[in-house]
Structure formats: structure tokens, C-alpha cells
Amino acid sequence: MAEPLIASEGHLGSLAKELLAVEAWEAGDSDLARDTFENLTLAFDAPESVRQRAQLGLAVLGPAPETRAAAPSETPAPAPADGETK
């Protein structure tokens, strides 16, 4: 029902996107909330008040958790050669 507003440009579209971000946040979808808030902070057609609230939302949400990169393989030290000591 709100899709036409969310897809629209201008003040009403920005407010609808802000509501989408808040609803996503309350539903536990912090990725959608963060993405929507980030887009609002960059939207030239968004009212300044919406951009400021989006920045506040991002500050409260914090940065996106980084996907854990594969840990560097911990290769054991080579065994001492015959006659060598540790």
C-alpha cells in the first residue's frame, strides 16, 4: 500500500522511506534500516530534517557488522629437522 509513496521522489517519498527504515529497524531488519537510512542521507531531494534523522538513525544503529573474513590459516611451525633442536 505504501509502495507508490516509497517509490516516489520528493518530500513524501523521503518521509515514506524514513518510515520504512524505522519499521525495518523495529522488526529487527537492521540491514534494510541501515541501507535505507544511508540512502536518505545521500538523497538530494530529501528534506534536511529527514537527512538529519537518518544520520541519527545510522549513529544509533552503528556500522554494519563486517562479514568475518576467513581466518588466516594457522599453520604449525615446521618440525625440526633431524639433529636440530627446538
Image (tube, rainbow, N blue to C red):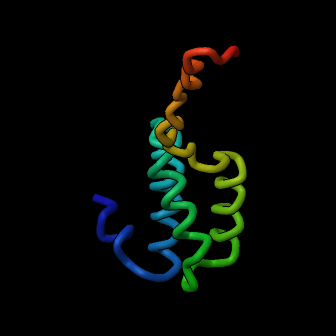
> Residue 8: where, in percent of width, then height?
37, 77
Residue 2 is left or right of residue 52, and the answer is: left
> Residue 64: where, in percent of width, then height?
57, 48
Position above or below: 9 against 20: below
Q: Nearer the viewer, residue 38 or 15?
A: 38
Residue at image position (65%, 55%) is 58
Residue at image position (65%, 70%) is 51
Q: Nearer the viewer, residue 13 or 55?
A: 55
Residue at image position (57%, 43%) is 65
Residue at image position (64%, 46%) is 61
Position above or below: 78 against 21: above
> Residue 2: where, in percent of width, then height?
33, 61
Q: Quadrant of residue 46?
A: bottom right
Q: Quadrant of residue 48?
A: bottom right
Position above or below: 31 against 83: below
Q: Quadrant of the C terminus?
A: top right
Report how many numbered discs are placed on residues in the image: 0
Position above or below: 62 against 53: above
Residue 16 is left or right of residue 62, and the answer is: left
> Residue 17: where, in percent of width, then height?
47, 64
